[in-house]
Amino acid sequence: MATQLSDAELITSLQARVKELETENAKLLSQLADCRSHEMEKKVYVPDERGGKSKKGNRKSEEKIEKMPGYNTRFMSHHSRRYVALKVMYFGKRFYGFASEAQMEPTVESELFKAFEKTRLLVGNKKESQYSRCGRTDKGVSSVGQVIALFLRSNLKISETNNGNSGVVLDEQHGEIDYVRVLNRVLPNDIRIMGWCPAPVDFHARFSCLSREYKYFFWKENLNIQAMESAGNKLVGEHDFRNFCKMDAANVHNYRRRIKLFEISPTDVRYNDNQLWVIKIRGSAFLWHQVRCMVVVLFMVGKGLESPNVIDMLLDTARILRKPQYTMASEVPLVLQSCEFDNIKFMCSSEAGEALHVHLVNECQIYQLQAAIFHEALLNCVPLSNDQSLLHFQGSKKKVSHVPLMSRPTEPSYEERRAKLNTVA
């Protein structure tokens, strides 16, 4: 006579059977996807009459596919996906900024989505992926800590539990996808994924960010570091920074931001008798071009062209209603260093981490070789006539006259810009 199972044992048995069926279903769906992908490849790579591959036909088909956003993602809709945050590094010199909305190519974002599609990690299109980015860095700006978030293909199975919350079960056979390793194998040399982290579905790379930190590198030369530090400390705290940014009156109505930290420190890099220094600025959020505007004013202070008190005057928006006209600092030395979040801890497998380390070391060596070649050219310059020394040559450079900031022409105020927008509307 068969032993009757208790209610608890019956529930356990049924749950185990459900898991077995889910596993079998996932395997069958995966096999179905492979078959569909194979059929698609056969349609694209049509053999010619001699049994070879029709190069012309292939090229047209490939071009058609490449131009179609998320071209192969419709075959991926059955796959499990998970919401992840990715930490991104990029060297900004050749990019027209991070965001792809500028209609200029290449951008970091466009290269990332090419990699997502090439690795078949993107499930659905960009809009369906719930994509967000932390910072929208400008043309030429680099980063070692940019953060993005989106849904990517996963080896996890999603199931509904009795309490209505979604449960996540790892595919024991395959483990989770090594996102860092997979993406870095197809990304260009000047972009790398530094780490990844599972994220809650309500996570937003921009609005969930607690603070952002930027670094700006510069050569000390004859700059007065103490004066720059005195001026920079005046930026710490919550202020109206409309005189330290490029104003976007159409989209930004609040120009108050909080600077949490300001530091100036030397690095261990030297060239001849010149030392490389770095400015570190951390804030909850930043306005358009805010860091580069703050830095160029600090340089004026460091050169003795402005007093540190000029910071107080520019922050007093009740007194200084219009921003003085000045050219902001170069974008090349600016780096988005890090983005801070609650409960986001980036990880990287040992294999992916080792490959990343080797790649970055190799890139450093390439740039050092280039620097060595330029230095060699410097040593082989034609000697100066009349026994003039290089120091005398540098000292004879034409000095550009400085117009004090408070005496310069000004830009339209926020109120004037808004009034003009309302008139146009």
Image: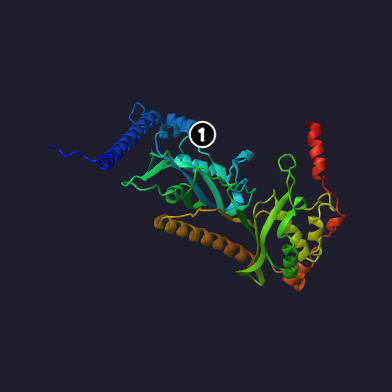
Say whether residue 243 is left or right of residue 146: right
The residue shown at (67%, 51%) is 286
Where does the image place residue 154, in percent across and percent down from the top left?
41, 43
57 or 418, nearer to the observer: 418
The single residue placed furthest to the right in the displayed view is 407
**Occupied quadrant, residue 37:** top left
Residue pictured at 78% horizontal, 56% vertical: 315
Q: State which quarter of the image contains the N terminus.
A: top left
**Towards the viewer: 16 or 26:** 16
Q: Quadrant of the C terminus?
A: top right
The image shows residue 320 at horizontal and vertical percentages of 84, 53
> How packed is label 1: few (under 14 Cα within 10 Å), some, or many (20 or more)?
some
Q: Nearer the viewer, residue 291 or 332?
A: 291
Q: Quadrant of residue 79?
A: top left
Out of 93 and 26, give the one closest to the viewer.
Answer: 26
Does residue 144 sit above or below 386 in this rendering?
Answer: above
Q: Position of residue 170 (x, y in %)?
A: 36, 46
Task: Say if residue 33 shows up in the picture.
Answer: yes
Three-letter amino acid code at disc 1? Answer: Pro
Measured as percent of width and height from the top left, residue 321 is found at 84, 49
Residue 72 visible in rendering: no
| Displayed quadrant of residue 119 | top left
Q: Is residue 57 left or right of residue 408?
A: left
Residue 63 against residue 153 in the figure, above or below: above
Element marked by disc 1 = loop
Q: Which residue is mark 1?
A: 69
